[in-house]
Image (cartoon, rainbow, N blue to C red):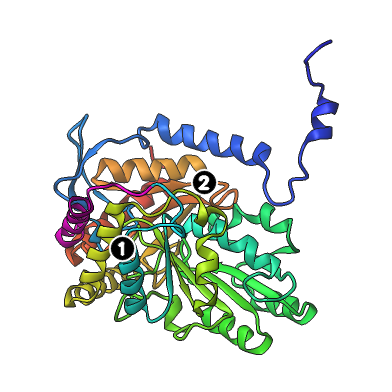
């Protein structure tokens, strides 16, 4: 008997591809990554002892400023944060308990929960990553187990992060899943009018530039009782007196219809993720649910660095770095006004150039001149809208931002003009 699978047989066993399609996405993505790799823009190995503003390629000696880091305030190298991680390991003398935290956890982990709750004004559930939190929470939200109801219709914003979209097939086994055009409040209201129980899944500051329509989302929540699941990973720490982020500028007091999740591995400067809850009633339940209940609790070093970052968040230095970040954003927006750049008002910018080759060329030339910015392609962005993503930071001076924009303008003009 032959083990060869015919085309007809392969088609018969192929998935429905309702919410993901590896056969389509992987070849397109791999072709783009090969292009970036062939131009030396992948696997750059660096010495980071001089900080992100002066990384050094250990193989070539080339020095550059890193504009692809999500550490938007530079707290990942703050001495208080680093030393707190070292101190926690020395004090506990164990890297972690390697078991489900709802059974046994370090007292330091409990103290972390209390410190986070005090910082952000309500129950906060920590985890090893924001992606793990979404994988645990979204299927339970879909099935109605977080709302004490029947299943909810789950509406994902089209630009919702991959860590949330990745869970769509699982969520679709529990309930109806819809994809909304980006920030389309009319689409969302039409769904709310049609169905009695709806949850909206979106980001606060989007990873490829742009901000959520928080006022519109809040209005629909108040009008229809819609549940809001909002990932504010790219804005946590960057604004707010305690670094509570962009989402909390409108959703100030959380209730049982709102959950804000975020990564603490970006501007917060540590590692892991958190879920800000409007009620403590689901706290213990979530701790033992799905990926949250597996044997990968927060490691001791991560608990320490998170506590260290909380200390910085409670100091005047947080405001200093936030203001510098805001100054850098204003400088960039003023200089690049009129260009095809997404992300006005945000620290995340996306410069669209169209073709993959142009995106890689722009990224490569910027790197040659001392700045690393990531080329982005389909499926991260729509086909034909490739470009370069860059992140401004609060540990960059205004002069650094000015110098970068000058180089960006020059290189961008060359790329768009098709110069050799």
Q: Residue 181's x, y, as percent?
A: 65, 66
| Residue pointed to by mark 2 | 377
Residue 175 vs 368, above or below: the answer is below
Whole-Å distance between the Cαs marked 1 and 2? 44 Å
Residue 365 vs 382, above or below: the answer is above
Q: Residue at x 32, y 77 (%)?
A: 119
Q: Earlier in the sequence, mark 1 or mark 2?
A: 1
Could you tell whether 58 is left or right of 372 in the image?
left
Could you tell whether 293 is left or right of 165 in the image?
left
Which contiguous range is marked in magenta? 77-97
Task: Indicate the quadrant containing the N terminus: top left, top right, bottom left or bottom right.
Answer: top right
Task: Indicate the quadrant containing the C terminus: top left, top right, bottom left or bottom right.
Answer: top left
Q: Which mark is residue 334?
A: none
**Relative depth, front residue between 154 and 126:** 126
Q: Residue at x 67, y 37 (%)?
A: 23
Is residue 395 visible in this depiction of the protein? yes
Q: Secondary structure at mark 2?
A: loop
**Magenta segment, prevailing SS (helix, strand or loop):** helix
Farthest residue to the top: give it: 1
**Relative depth, front residue between 328 and 283:** 283
Residue 314 vs 352, above or below: the answer is below
In the rendered image, residue 282 lying in the magenta stretch gets the answer no
């Amino acid at each position: 008997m032959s083990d060869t699978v015919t085309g007809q047989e392969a088609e018969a066993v192929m998935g429905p591809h309702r919410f993901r399609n590896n056969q389509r996405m992987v070849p397109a993505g791999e072709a783009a990554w090969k292009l970036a790799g062939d131009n030396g823009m992948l696997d750059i190995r660096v010495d980071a002892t001089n900080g992100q503003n002066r990384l050094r390629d250990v193989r070539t000696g080339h020095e550059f400023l890193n504009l692809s880091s999500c550490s938007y305030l530079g707290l990942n190298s703050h001495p208080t944060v680093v030393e707190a991680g070292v101190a926690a390991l020395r004090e506990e003398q164990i890297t972690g308990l390697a078991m489900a935290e709802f059974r046994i956890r370090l007292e330091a982990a409990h103290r972390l929960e209390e410190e986070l709750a005090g910082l952000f004004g309500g129950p906060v559930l920590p985890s090893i990553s924001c992606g793990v939190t979404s994988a645990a929470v979204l299927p339970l939200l879909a099935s109605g187990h977080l709302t004490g109801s029947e299943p909810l219709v789950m509406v994902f914003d089209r630009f919702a992060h991959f860590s949330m979209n990745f869970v769509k097939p699982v969520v679709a086994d529990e309930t109806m899943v819809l994809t909304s055009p980006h920030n389309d409040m009319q689409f969302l209201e039409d769904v709310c009018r049609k169905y009695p129980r709806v949850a909206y899944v979106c980001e606060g500051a989007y990873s490829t530039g742009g901000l959520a329509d928080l006022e519109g989302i809040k209005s629909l929540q108040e009008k229809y009782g819609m549940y809001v699941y909002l990932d504010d990973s790219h804005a946590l720490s960057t604004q707010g007196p305690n670094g509570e982020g962009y989402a909390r500028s409108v959703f100030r007091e959380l209730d049982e219809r709102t959950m804000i999740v975020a990564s603490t591995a970006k501007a917060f400067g540590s590692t892991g993720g958190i879920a800000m809850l409007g009620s403590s009633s689901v706290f213990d339940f979530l701790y033992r649910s799905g990926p949250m209940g597996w044997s990968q609790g927060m490691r001791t070093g991560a608990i320490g660095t998170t506590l260290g970052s909380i200390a910085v968040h409670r100091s005047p230095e947080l405001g200093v770095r936030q203001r510098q970040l805001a100054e850098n954003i204003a400088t960039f927006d003023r200089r690049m006004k009129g260009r095809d750049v997404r992300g006005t008002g945000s620290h995340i910018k996306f410069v669209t150039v169209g073709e993959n080759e142009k995106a890689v060329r722009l990224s490569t030339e910027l790197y040659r001149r001392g700045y690393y910015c990531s080329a982005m392609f389909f499926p991260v962005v729509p086909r034909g809208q490739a470009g370069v993503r860059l992140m401004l930071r609060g540990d960059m001076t205004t002069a650094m931002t000015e110098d970068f924009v000058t180089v960006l303008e020059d290189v961008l003009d060359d790329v768009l003009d098709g110069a050799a």
